[in-house]
Image: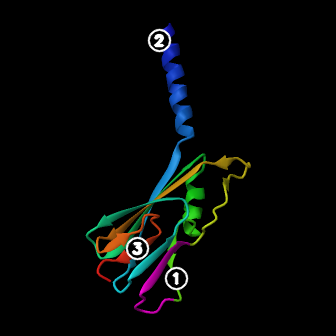
Amino acid sequence: MRLPQFLSLCFCLVCGLQAQAQMERTMYQVFEVDSAQTVHFEIAGEYEILEWAGNSILVETNVQIWDASREILADLIKIGRYDLATDSTAGPNPKQVKIFTKHLNRKSIKRLDGQKCLEIAVTKIFVPDTFYISEDKQRLTRKGG
């Protein structure tokens, strides 16, 4: 008789944990830096810079949100909360490029009932191996330039 009760308890625990599961999405952006001698970053949140053999900058942003619906995450993506952009004042062949987060100061996410949602956004920036990466990871300088 204890086994059915134990199995019922396990089932309830598993269902309860799944109800608080996170929503997750990974987004990609590409930035051409063919003529750039330097690239400056102003990125919100955690980010990591990795070298790769490509000739453009590839940005991968992984977002996880707990206690939120799919619609909340979709709306945050739609308004560009995690988007990066380049300095629009640069000409067609800029020597200096600035890549920045459009929404640098991100406010806490709240549901309609006022409860805050836990949000983790991690960005990986893949840069061409033709650049040196500064120690503070905020600037790239083209090798041989």
**Disc marking residue 3:** 2
Q: Is residue 112 left or right of residue 104?
A: right
Residue at position x 54%, y 27% from top?
13
Q: Secondary structure at mark 3?
A: strand
Distance from Cα at disc 1 to Cα at disc 2: 64 Å
- Which tag, 1 or 3, sits closer to the chain's start? 1
Query: SS for tag 2?
Result: helix
The residue drawn where x is 43% and y is 89% is: 94
For numbered disc 1, what is the local secondary structure? loop
Asked whether 92 or 17 is in front, the reply is 92
Q: Residues within 10 Å of mark 1 (few under 14, many from 20)?
A: few
Q: What percent of the width, then of the height, locates residue 84?
A: 50, 72
**Name of the residue lying farthest toward the right:** 114
Q: What is the spatial separation of the Cα atoms under label 1 and label 3, in whole angstroms?
A: 15 Å
Q: Which residue is mark 3?
A: 140
Magenta segment boundaries in residue numbering: 90-101
Residue occupying the point 38% across, 84% down: 36
Residue 133 placement (x, y as % from top left): 38, 68
| Amino acid beneath label 1 | Asp
